[in-house]
Amino acid sequence: MMSHKPEINVFTPLPIDMNSDLSTNAQIMKLPPHAREFYFKTFKHSGFNLGLKELRQSHMMSGLDGQGCIIIGNPGLGKSRLLRYFATEVYQQPEYQATDEVTKLPLLSIRVPGKPSILGIIEKLMDCARYEHPTPRNIDMAIKQLYRFIRFTGVEIIIFDEFQHLLRKNALIRTRDIMAFIKVLMDDLCLSVVFSGLPELVTLLDEHEEIKERFSSANVELVPFSISNTKNMKEFASYLKNIENNFTNAGYSICSLLELDMLKRFYIATLGIPRRITQLFMRVMTQLPDKKEITANDLNLIFKAMAYNKIKNFNLFTEHSYQIDAQYSELLNKQNGVIKKSNTNHKAGTRQGGS
């Protein structure tokens, strides 16, 4: 079983194209150093840790049995970050380092194309591995080429991201052939396979019993943070505490993020979605690079300009606590489907919850 390093830098170049390699993105290098470090830092939480555990378990079983792992969640919850973290962890292991004879590729990861086909998926797998020879247009020959490549480079686990593209409404008649191809690939080569995508992808497996059983034991759903109970509140606070510590270590002084009142403000602002939290703090670091003391007024100014902000006329980070409590209660009622019975003319703080 592989040993795990405590810190993984997801900016690390990989020997595969992990859905367009971050390390080659010139725009990223234009970010201030502290902002770039923050963007690529991974702040773990229980859902992330569970997903990582299941990915490690699936990888460990590769070569023994063809089985799979499902990672689902709505956009912004950290699926891509989790998959890249896992891939980086795998490729940091000593046994997978390149030699003079071969560059080992234990893991491949592709995004399922919008109009999937067996040949299209094979081409993406070969492109991911930077395989320079053209893929045969004959499907049988392309499959033979893929099998030889997998055996030669030691592929052990394949990640299919955006797997909802294989839903019947997207893939039409191709779905059954592709699912059969993946099943045979797992069986013939004892590969582990990961399906990642929107929650609706699990309905796809209901139509394919022959492969569904292989994914029955590892199904992880990433969900937004919540502060609806003490346990959830502590986890959200822990996540923000790590961010606060990051600012402190970078030489910033930032207002406390951990008081219940501030947790409510951040939940109203971001709906507990990690991507929105990252975007908010990234904007702080890029728009206020020389300001070493970040206040509630600064957070308020930055939040007003965020694209996902639906309450631009409401000073979320500076309003009185009783107004925040009212906003928070209204948001929870909407999430729980509670219809407000009384009319009110105060609409400044209405939260629609859209992106």
Image (spheres, helix red, strand yellow):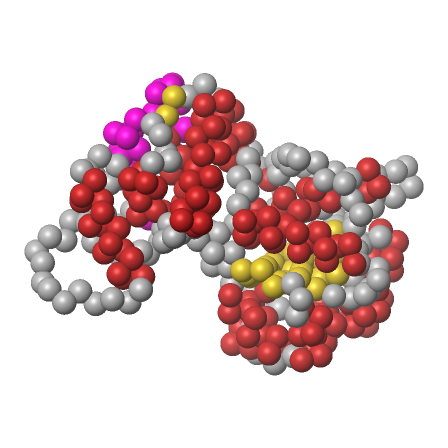
Frontmost residue, 144 versus 34: 34
In the picture shown, does residue 12 fall above or below 121? above
Image side of residue 100 versus residue 206, left or right: right
Q: Residue at x 51, y 59 (%)?
A: 73
Q: Which of the 4 quarters of the picture holds residue 301?
A: top left
> In this view, which residue lies farthest toward the front?
230
Quadrant where the image shows the C terminus:
bottom left
Q: Is residue 288 magenta?
A: yes
Asked if residue 131 lies left or right of residue 196, the reply is: right
Q: How many marks?
A: 0
Q: Identify the residue shown where x is 63% and y is 46%.
A: 84
Please tell me which residue lies in front, 64 or 321: 321
Magenta region? 285-308
Residue 121 in view, yes or no? no
Where residue 220 sits in the image (x, y, percent)?
58, 60
Q: Position of residue 123 (x, y in %)?
A: 71, 60
Can residue 135 be found in the magenta stretch?
no
Please identify the quarter of the rendering in which residue 209 is found.
Answer: bottom right
Q: Is residue 94 above or below residue 150?
A: above
Residue 48 horizontal/vertical position (percent): 56, 49
Vertical side of 293 occupied by 192: above or below: below
Image point (42%, 40%), residue name: 237
